[in-house]
Each structure stands twice: as structure tokens, then as C-alpha cells.
């Protein structure tokens, strides 16, 4: 079983992913944390020193490594992971993708405190700018997120709810 969690920054992919991995008794990985571990530097440092294009290449390579290494896995992807280097196709071919859909006001509330540690949000001066950026980013990424076979609204996205979604999905295929 491979379950990939996709969605915007602040959607809760890591938190939910840990719970699902425990429930299914499979390894959990956070793609961003794996990149940091392998690069031995933070994501803001990667962006600052080598740029987003380099980060996206490393992200794709680490994703492919994890898929090759772990036949059973719950993976919290980065918010942009599905949008680059045919990553979404890999996710759809090798496991089940779940889109965590969170309304923009909730995303703003969740990421506002940590925006400085997120390279694509760090330079924004206030909550209004953050909301504008998240709205624009979601608009660009929505076409990728919508291809996930499973979708869970933030307010209803518990471990139990996702397990039921997966059970219904598996029974239908």
C-alpha cells in the first residue's frame, strides 16, 4: 500500500500522514524532510543557494528513490510536488493519491506563523499578501490536485474518515 497526500502548504499532510502510517502500520515519510536529510541543509537554504529549479529536481529524484525503496508507504508530499517533473503521474501509477482540500482562509491561519520558513511565502509582508499568494498558487495547482482519486475536505479529514474513503474506493475498483 502506498498512499500519497497532496495539497497546499498547511493542509495537514504531515500530521494526517503520521496518523495514517500508524493506523496502517507502514512507514511514514515527509518528502520535504527527506530532502533536508539528504541535502544536509534546510529548504530555505536550498532555495537561496541553488534556486527553485534545483529544489524541484531534487524533489523529483528523492520522490523516485522513496517509491523504489518502499513498497508500503504513507508519504506527505510538498505542496508543489505533483506539479513538476511528471511527479503526479508517478504518484498515480504507483499508489493512491489523496488531495487534502483546505479553504484559503484556513490555510492562511495555519501557515501565517510559519511563513518565514517556507521559501515561496517568506517575503510576504502580511496576511493579505499571504492570502493573495495562496489563492494564486492554489489556482495554478488545482488542475493537478483535482486528478487525485481521493479528496478529503479539511474539516472532515481524520484518520478514520480517510480509512473509510480508501475502503470505499477499493471496493469500487
Image (spheres, rainbow, N blue to C red):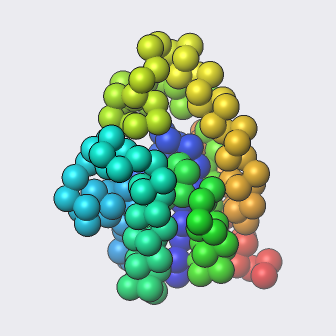
| Residue 45, above or below 26 | above
Q: Is residue 43 visible?
A: no
Q: Is residue 142 visible?
A: yes
Q: Nearer the viewer, residue 170 or 160?
A: 170
Instruction: State the image coordinates of residue 66 (x, y, percent, origin top left).
Output: 41, 77
Residue found farthest to the right = 172
When asked about the image quadrant of residue 125, the answer is top left
Instruction: State the image coordinates of residue 64 (x, y, percent, origin top left).
Output: 47, 77
Q: Is residue 131 left or right of residue 67?
A: right
Instruction: State the image coordinates of residue 117 (x, y, percent, origin top left).
Output: 33, 35
Q: Nearer the viewer, residue 60 or 160?
A: 60
Q: Residue at x 55, y 51 (%)?
A: 80
Residue found farthest to the left = 40
When asked about the image quadrant of residue 165, the answer is bottom right
Q: Residue at x 73, y 65 (%)?
A: 149
Q: So how many labels did they put on this image?
A: 0
| Residue 74, above or below 156 | below
Q: Residue at x 72, y 71 (%)?
A: 168
Instruction: State the image coordinates of residue 78 (x, y, percent, origin top left).
Output: 48, 53
| Residue 96, above or below 138 | below
Amino acid at each position: 500500500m502506498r498512499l500519497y497526500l497532496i495539497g497546499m502548504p498547511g493542509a495537514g499532510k504531515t500530521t494526517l500522514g503520521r496518523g495514517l502510517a500508524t493506523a496502517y502500520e507502514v512507514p511514514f515519510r515527509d518528502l520535504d524532510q527527506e530532502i533536508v536529510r539528504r541535502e544536509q541543509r534546510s529548504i530555505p537554504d536550498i532555495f537561496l543557494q541553488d534556486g527553485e529549479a534545483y529544489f524541484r529536481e531534487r524533489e523529483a529524484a528523492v520522490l523516485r528513490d522513496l517509491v523504489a525503496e518502499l513498497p508500503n508507504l504513507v508519504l506527505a508530499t510538498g505542496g508543489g510536488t505533483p506539479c513538476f517533473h511528471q511527479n503526479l503521474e508517478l504518484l498515480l501509477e504507483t499508489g493512491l493519491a489523496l488531495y487534502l482540500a483546505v479553504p484559503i482562509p484556513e490555510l492562511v491561519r495555519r501557515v501565517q506563523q510559519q511563513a518565514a520558513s517556507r521559501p515561496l511565502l517568506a517575503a510576504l509582508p502580511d496576511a493579505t499578501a499571504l492570502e493573495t499568494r495562496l489563492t494564486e498558487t492554489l489556482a495554478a495547482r488545482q488542475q493537478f490536485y483535482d486528478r487525485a482519486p481521493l479528496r478529503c475536505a479539511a474539516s472532515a479529514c481524520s484518520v478514520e474518515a480517510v480509512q473509510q474513503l480508501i475502503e470505499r474506493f477499493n471496493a469500487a475498483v
